[in-house]
């Protein structure tokens, strides 16, 4: 089998094999096929630089993708990193760049990446080659009504410029700075001048009249003569030269001296190190970097790692090395601290008495954790006892998995929060651990969840009480209950059904696991009415008027009357 893909995708002279319309058509079909999952119609972003052959290749790719049932989104001329950005922000399945980078206009290329903006794996590329070169695509074509539709996106420049501007630190400004840009008659000719001008710079642009034949022609990152002259002539602070597709950059300083990519890397690494932000004190570049870079890294006390040529390998190595731990904890030094923590833990301040007859809310959360811990789970909560039990018994293992209003105490937060989290993480399991009173405050948001197909799970610890209020009334007000009990709750299963969602009621500890599994399986919003012990209290608790180190544990609660002084009672 002949290979089409090299380190930079498929490359060659335009209108000749493999850079002809037949192969481009095949790539369009193969990519659409690769990213089709069941009835899912793959969304594929296609962008290009300014080469004349871009029109032909764009048209062929568009035809290929639509014929295989995918929807191509044509963004027109945009730098390669801009196409990766749009692919990610549009949540597309893949992006295709038509460009031969810094090479002359006669050449062209096709580069494919996945929805995350990274290049395809070797296996995916081999799969595409196999489909094209062994004539396997025709038999995969769908019937006419399953063919795709193409869209032309007009507003991508603005979106990409906003993204670029957001990467520039707020405390810095380009106000009053003269900058010369050489856009190589290529893909950056519109975006780069606008982005820098919007950041306040006084921008002068050269080689910004693309005509299809002049890309990289004696200009851009490979030929910086014109830029150097213009920087000196205009007494500019800096000059920047891009290559044809805008993923390569050479800078020129105020004296017209070239600053190479290696030098820029070193400046970035050194600055980050000074700011204490250089993870593992490490700079990764390719083996093509100059020996001088290594020497300079030594001089500035930086570690250097050389990857294989190709940005994919650099990224892979960066991620692998980034995950390495910078410092190992000194176990010996921590022993005394762990012993102290052990003593505190031995008190078992979260213990509770479980029951075979009635579901204890703590037990329900423990089971919920056990049955969801191997999934990509996010938890939101309302406010009340259930919120505290969720914090105590759901064993969070990662940051940013716990969305709660904390001390702000916003009943009604958990349901809309779960809608937001599910929208941001469509494939994750999102659970609102709720109280029956809180969740009714924003129950209308069930409509939003149903309308936008967000399969959120509302796990109600239904104790028929505003439990948190009842607990205070019981323990601190001598059991004089006031407005904390509800006899008139809706039937939550029917309420779920009224919203065209799924309802589950669970009343016995024995059925808990099976019903939690059902909740997870259903690909719809679910209201889970978990009927729990109405009298359970949440501990530890600080009696009013007492200090933090005088917390009441569960067993002490029986003597709580003694624990709260008259003065303390008057405080609540
Ligand atoms: C909007 C709002 N109103 C009132 C309160 C005061 N408050 C805190 S918890 C609570 C009761 C919550 O009851 P429920 O949702 O059933 O949770 P439980 O304590 O029973 O688990 C109340 C009224 C609040 N935090 N927010
Ligand atoms: Mg309640």
Image (cartoon, grey):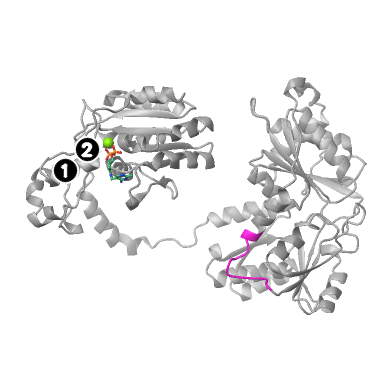
How many circles with numbers are drawn on the protein? Answer: 2
Q: Residues within 10 Å of mark 1 (few under 14, many from 20)?
A: some
Give the structural element (helix, strand or loop) at label 1: helix
Q: Please tell me which residue lies in front, 306 or 353.
A: 353
Q: Is mark 2 within 8 Å of ligand 1?
A: yes
From this view, report whether residue 100 is shown above or below residue 428: below
Q: Position of residue 338 (x, y in %)?
A: 29, 57
Where, by quadrant of the figure, is residue 252 drawn?
bottom right
Q: Please tell me which residue lies in front, 125 or 485.
A: 485
Q: Residue at x 83, y 40 (%)?
A: 58
Q: Position of residue 458 (x, y in %)?
A: 39, 33
Q: Which residue is mark 2?
A: 484
Q: Position of residue 31 (x, y in %)?
A: 74, 35
Q: Name the mark on residue 513.
A: none
Looking at the image, residue 554 sits to the left or right of residue 27; the answer is left
Q: Which residues fall within the magenta stretch? A: 165-175
In this rendering, does residue 514 appear at all?
no
In three-dimensional space, the C-alpha distance between marks 1 and 2, rounded to whole angstroms, equals: 9 Å
From this view, report whether residue 8 is shown above or below residue 548: above
Which label's residue is closer to the chain start, 1 or 2?
A: 1
Give the structural element (helix, strand or loop) at label 2: loop
Q: Which residue is mark 1?
A: 473
Q: Quadrant of the N terminus?
A: top right
Q: Are marks 1 and 2 in contact (CB under 8 Å)?
A: yes
Q: Please tell me which residue lies in front, 353 or 445.
A: 445
Queried whether the magenta region covers residue 456, the answer comes back as: no
In this rendering, does residue 341 appear at all?
yes
Looking at the image, residue 273 sits to the left or right of residue 77; the answer is left
């Amino acid at each position: 089998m002949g290979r089409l893909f090299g380190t930079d995708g498929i490359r060659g002279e335009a209108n000749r094999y493999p850079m002809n319309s037949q192969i481009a058509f095949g790539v369009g079909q193969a990519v659409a096929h690769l990213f089709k999952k069941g009835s899912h119609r793959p969304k594929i972003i296609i962008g290009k630089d300014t080469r004349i052959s871009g029109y032909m290749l764009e048209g062929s790719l568009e035809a290929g993708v639509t014929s295989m049932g995918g929807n191509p989104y044509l963004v027109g001329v945009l730098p390669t990193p801009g196409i990766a950005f749009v692919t990610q922000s549009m949540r597309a399945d893949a992006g295709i760049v038509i460009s031969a980078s810094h090479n002359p206009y006669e050449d062209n290329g096709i580069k494919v990446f996945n929805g995350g903006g990274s290049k395809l794996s070797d296996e995916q590329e081999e799969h595409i080659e196999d489909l094209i070169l062994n004539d396997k695509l025709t038999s995969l074509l769908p019937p006419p009504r399953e063919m795709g539709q193409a869209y032309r996106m007009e507003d991508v420049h603005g979106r990409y410029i906003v993204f670029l501007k957001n990467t520039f630190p707020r405390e810095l400004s380009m106000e009053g700075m003269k900058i010369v840009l050489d856009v190589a008659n290529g893909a950056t000719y519109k975006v780069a001048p606008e982005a820098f001008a919007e950041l306040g710079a006084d921008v002068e642009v050269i080689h910004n009249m693309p005509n299809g034949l002049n890309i990289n022609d004696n200009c851009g990152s490979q030929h910086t003569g014109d830029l150097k002259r213009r920087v000196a002539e205009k007494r500019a602070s800096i000059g920047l030269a891009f290559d044809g597709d805008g993923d390569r950059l050479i800078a020129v300083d105020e004296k017209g001296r070239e600053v190479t990519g290696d030098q820029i890397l070193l400046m970035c690494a050194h600055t980050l190190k000074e700011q204490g932000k250089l993870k593992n004190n490490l700079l990764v570049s390719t083996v093509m970097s100059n020996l001088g870079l290594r020497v300079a890294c030594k001089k500035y006390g930086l570690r250097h790692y050389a990857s294989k040529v190709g940005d994919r390998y650099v990224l892979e190595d960066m991620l692998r090395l980034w995950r390495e731990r910078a410092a190992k904890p000194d176990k010996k030094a921590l022993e005394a601290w762990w012993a102290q923590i052990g003593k505190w833990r031995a008190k078992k301040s979260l213990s509770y008495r479980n029951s075979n007859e009635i579901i204890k809310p703590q037990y329900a959360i423990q089971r919920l954790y056990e049955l969801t811990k191997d999934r990509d789970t996010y938890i939101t909560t309302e406010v009340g006892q259930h919120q505290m039990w969720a914090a105590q018994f759901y064993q969070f293992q990662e940051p940013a998995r716990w969305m709660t209003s904390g001390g702000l105490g916003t009943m009604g937060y958990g349901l809309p929060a779960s809608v937001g989290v599910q929208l941001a993480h469509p494939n994750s399991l999102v659970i609102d651990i709720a109280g029956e009173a809180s969740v009714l405050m924003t129950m209308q948001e069930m409509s939003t969840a149903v309308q936008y197909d967000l399969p959120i799970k509302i796990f109600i610890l239904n104790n028929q009480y505003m439990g948190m209020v009842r607990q205070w009334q019981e323990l601190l007000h001598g059991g004089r209950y006031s407005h904390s009990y509800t006899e008139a709750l809706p039937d939550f299963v029917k309420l779920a059904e009224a919203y065209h969602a799924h309802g589950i009621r669970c009343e016995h500890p024995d059925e808990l696991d099976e019903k939690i599994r059902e909740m997870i399986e259903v690909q719809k919003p679910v209201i889970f009415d978990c009927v729990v012990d109405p009298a359970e209290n949440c501990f530890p608790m600080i009696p009013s008027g007492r200090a933090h180190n005088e917390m009441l544990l569960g067993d002490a609660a029986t003597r709580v009357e003694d624990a709260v002084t008259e003065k303390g009672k008057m405080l609540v």
